[in-house]
Image (cartoon, rainbow, N blue to C red):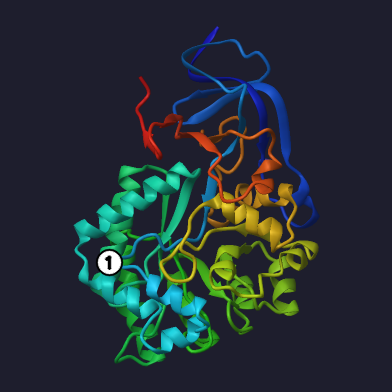
Amino acid sequence: MENCELLIKNCKEVVSSQEKFTRGKKMKNINIWNDIDIAISGNKIIDMGKNLKYRPNRVIDASDYVVMPGFIDSHTHLVFSGARDDEYLMRVRGESYEKIAEKGGGIKNTVSNTRKMSEEELLEISEKRLKKLLSYGTTTVEIKSGYGLDKETELKMLRVIKKLDKKYPNTVIPTYLGPHEIPQNYTEEEYIDFVCNEVLPEIKNKELAVFTDIFTEKGVFSIKSTEKYFKCAQDLGFKLKIHADELNPLGGAEIAAKYGAYSADHLMEITDKGIKKLASSNTVATLLPGTSFFLMKDKYAPARKLIDNNAIVSIASDFNPGSSNGFNMQFMMNLASLYLKMEIEEIINAVGINAAKALDLNDRGTIAKNKRADLLFLDIPNYKYLVYQYGLNNVKMVIKNGKKVIENRLDYLMEEDR
């Protein structure tokens, strides 16, 4: 009889993406098992099946739980300083996000606060957010910079993200989003030159980011600037992402497909041409329903059109202080069902294997032998309750890198295996 470190026994229901990213109609394909065991050693799943015969160091009885892969949130702005609750109330009273930004709110507001905060303070508040995010079942999270705009603060943010990655191994994916806004005293062209010539090379030399991102939007960065930025980033060896077609149909999706970006995100205003370009590429269409919801927009990304045209679709939170102040991926799944009209099986793929594809990760997002042991224990009757109930945290236990995260108080605290 072989040894294993952890044996999860009698899982009531195990639901998972299949082992490869999926697109179009195949997004309805998932794996479902009942009353099976999962054996884990190190940070990997080593076996699955009924009545597994192992000598475990630890056993968990999962007969009351639905087990699924940890959620992968492939688009967040988790590292920032300062709240924008006043702006939220202004929106509720009828002011638009764009009008608030014109008055000095929006991204500029958060930039000002983030520049003032020390690196140590920024790390402290960001780690608190990360712990809460983990308690809601997100076991992999992409984090962007972009609230500095100057080199000093952008590097500070990326150092904080790197420290989080060191404290929480295989959890954090760092992205540089310097072109998030055009700072004062720069033209658009001058700022792109500054980013390409002075900031990106230093980030690469210090290994502070894996991905680069840009906000391609009317009044921010044009298609011309985006292409220049993409060429520069690719020459330095960065992987590409883009905020595309969020408020206006500028053709960001087409540029993402052209340059082989790993994801094109937002897409509320994507055109039929953009949908076809994405569908014929391996660029993931990352949809952020929390943003439309929080901004009280009538329009959501056309998930059904994207899926029906054979695109790869994922769902993320866009957690940030202004336009999507929430990171509960269970709620994002509710929104995907209600407003994107996605099927529950499509949503499971969208927060699992397809979200892993958006981050170029091959070791997670699914439950299978030799995959990373990032697992959730959900206190629900069956997986359909993931979208049937809303606003709740149904995660009762998290396994991250083969280690147990337990419910201890109102949140979940990491505990070393004993």
Pick the front one: 360 or 63: 63
Residue sitting at x 71%, y 25%: 34
Residue in view at x 48 percent, y 89 percent: 219
Furthest residue to the front?
93
Front-lying residue, 169 or 277? 169
> Which residue is at a point 26% across and 55% down the rendered structure image?
123
For mark 1, give the secondary structure: helix
From the viewer's perspective, is 83 left or right of 223?
left
**Residue 356 in sight in this render:** no
Where residue 218 appears, as percent x and y from the top left, is 53, 88
Specify whether 415 is left or right of 68: left
Side of 367 relative to 327 (left or right): right
- Residue shown at the point (55%, 42%) measured from the top left: 364
Q: Which residue, given by chain and number where applicable, does mark 1 sit on?
A: 155
Image quadrant occupied by the C terminus: top left
Crowd band around label 1 with a 10 angstrom C-alpha radius: few (<14), some (14–19), many (20+): many
Amino acid at circle 1: Leu
Q: Position of residue 179 (x, y in %)?
A: 41, 77
Tell me residue 202's x, y (percent).
28, 68
